Amino acid sequence: MEAKNIGRIALGAFLITAGIGHLTFARKEFQAQVPDWVPLPKDDTVVYSGIAEILLGTATIAAPEKHRATMGKIVATFFAAVLPGNISQYKNRKDSFGLNNDKARFARLFMQAPLIAWALKSTEK
């Protein structure tokens, strides 16, 4: 199996695992990342985003080759859409996932770019 496919499948598994975490063991942790301006209850937002991640991960793994680049763009957009939550967590000094100081929360802001690159590179034609 070529490296790009391994990366794509790993990306899908990462999303599915994160989605399961949203629904189960990390639900409270993810609530700290929901900005106060989101018009839904924090728990509902976490559940809906967890379902979205499971669906995106499954589609990333299962997509036929001709649709993989499109899936990569969709996943990259999802990762970009998560950034306001990371900014909110930093700005409001909310602890979760071991991000218990400003330096750690600030460093987390720069993780979206590699995730976006992973989504695009592992699914490109």
Image: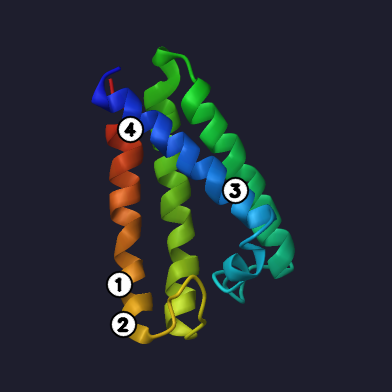
Q: How far is disc 2 from disc 3 in space, using C-alphas? A: 26 Å
Q: Quadrant of residue 75?
A: top left
Q: Amino acid at mark 1?
A: Ala
Task: Examine the rendered structure and indicate whether residue 40 appears above or below residue 56.
Answer: below
Q: Point out which mark residue 7 bears.
A: 4
- Crowding near pointer 3: few (<14 within 10 Å), some, many (20+)? many
Instruction: Report if the CB atoms under discs 1 and 2 are less than 8 Å apart.
Output: yes
Instruction: Report if the CB atoms under discs 2 and 3 are less than 8 Å apart.
Output: no
Residue at x 54%, y 45% (from the top left corner): 17
Q: Amino acid at mark 3?
A: Gly
- Crowding near pointer 4: few (<14 within 10 Å), some, many (20+)? some
Q: Amino acid at mark 2?
A: Lys
Q: How far is disc 4 from disc 3 in space, using C-alphas? A: 18 Å
Task: Examine the rendered structure and indicate whether residue 77 appears above or below residue 104.
Answer: above
Quadrant that contains the N terminus? top left
Q: How far is disc 4 from disc 2 in space, using C-alphas? A: 29 Å
Identify the residue under disc 2: 103
Quadrant that contains the C terminus? top left
Q: Point out which mark residue 19 bears.
A: 3
**Residue 65 appears anywhere in the view:** yes
- Crowding near pointer 2: few (<14 within 10 Å), some, many (20+)? few
Among the two numbered marks 4 and 1 on one chain, the one whose residue lies closer to the N terminus:
4
Q: Amino acid at mark 4?
A: Gly
Q: Relative to residue 20, is residue 104 drawn left or right?
A: left
Q: Where does residue 43 sit, x and y in percent of width and height? A: 72, 65
Q: Where does residue 60 sit, x and y in percent of width and height? A: 48, 29
Among the two numbered marks 2 and 3 on one chain, the one whose residue lies closer to the N terminus:
3
Identify the residue under disc 1: 107
Q: How far is disc 3 from disc 1 in space, using C-alphas? A: 22 Å
Secondary structure beneath dot 3 equals helix
Among the two numbered marks 4 and 2 on one chain, the one whose residue lies closer to the N terminus:
4
Residue at x 37%, y 25% (from the top left corner): 69
